[in-house]
Image: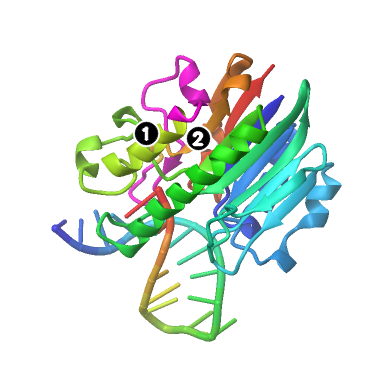
Amino acid sequence: MKFATWNVNSLAVRLPQLLAWLEANPVDALVLQETKLTDDKFPTMDIGAAGYQVQWFGQKTYNGVALISKTPATDVVKNITGYADEQARLIAGTVDGVRGPVRVIGGYFPNGQALDSDKFVYKMAWLDGLKAWLKTELATHEKLVLMGDFNIAPEDRDCYDPAAFVGQTHTSPQERAHFQALLDMGLTDAYRLFEQPPKSYSWWDYRMLGFQKNKGLRIDHILVSNALKGSVSACVIDRQMRKNPQPSDHAPVIVTID
DNA sequence: ATGACGGTGTGGCACCGA
């Protein structure tokens, strides 16, 4: 089985790349973030023609998520149950896996902007809400993958210049404590199950030749539950996608589970 | 130090992202 996550930074712009990527990477499920489309504009037909099922949940201009899958997703949830949110940031569904159903959750975690901003307060509240809801999800779904743009670099090695980020978002102790809390609930960062190239990132700033200089962050993650952990055989970041003309600023992350 | 790049909107620049 393969599961993947990709922040497309506008699906309207990235649709051709998405379809080409799906053709080259036949995944069981892919979650998208930052579709930036209202639901009426979602390209359902194109994705269906590519042989995939899709669930989507968007809004105007910002945010927006989708769950693309080989088998139809069931028990679909949009946003965090129990956490009232005006922003479209999460979608979950159950898909067929090789050894039974797998719960797939895709999230576009809040950015936070600055540690002293209202947006950071929102980020912390959203993470609290996620944690509370995830407790019941884990209790009812043994095999679960939590994927998405977490907007958190869990360790210093996930940031191109940790010293420069002190006092900023994405690397703060508060955000990292939330990431650790997810691990403590019985989830594992699939990427770190394997030896990986040093300075591995999943996002690079469009500005100042961020990608060319490999000034990036590893903020897109795939966490797997204990029931899946032992079957994970690979986890990679598809850096090639960042080399495309008109790339997203994020690269897809893919996990393989036997 | 600053702003830089890319996307969206009902625009002629402002905003947001990370």
The amino acid type found where label 1 is placed reads: Pro
Image spot of residue A68 (x, y percent)? 73, 44
Secondary structure at badge 1 equals: loop
The answer to whether one can see residue A255 in this image is yes
Secondary structure at badge 2 equals: strand
Query: Which quadrant of the figure contains the C terminus of chain A?
Result: top right
Q: Nearer the viewer, residue B8 or A230?
A: A230
Q: Nearer the viewer, residue A135 or A145?
A: A135
Residue at (49%, 15%) from the top-left corner?
Answer: A194
Image spot of residue A205 (x, y percent)? 39, 48
What main secondary structure does the magenta stretch of the protein show?
A: loop
Mark 1 vs 2: CB contact within 8 A? yes
Label 2 marks which chain's residue? A
Image spot of residue A215 (x, y percent)? 34, 38
Q: Is residue A127 above or below residue B8?
A: above
Q: Residues within 10 Å of mark 2 (few under 14, many from 20)?
A: many
Q: Which mark is residue A45?
A: none
Q: Is residue A118 above or below residue A129?
A: below
The answer to whether A158 appears left or right of A109 in the picture is left
Query: Which quadrant of the figure contains the N terminus of chain A?
Result: top right
Nearest to N terminus: mark 1 or mark 2: 1
For disc 1, the marked residue is A154
Q: Is residue A19 above or below residue A142?
A: below
Q: Nearer the viewer, residue A233 or A127?
A: A127
The answer to whether one can see residue A111 in this image is no
Label 1 marks which chain's residue? A
Residue stretch rendered in magenta on the structure: A184-210
Q: Kindly indicate the quadrant of the structure image that contains residue A165.
A: top left
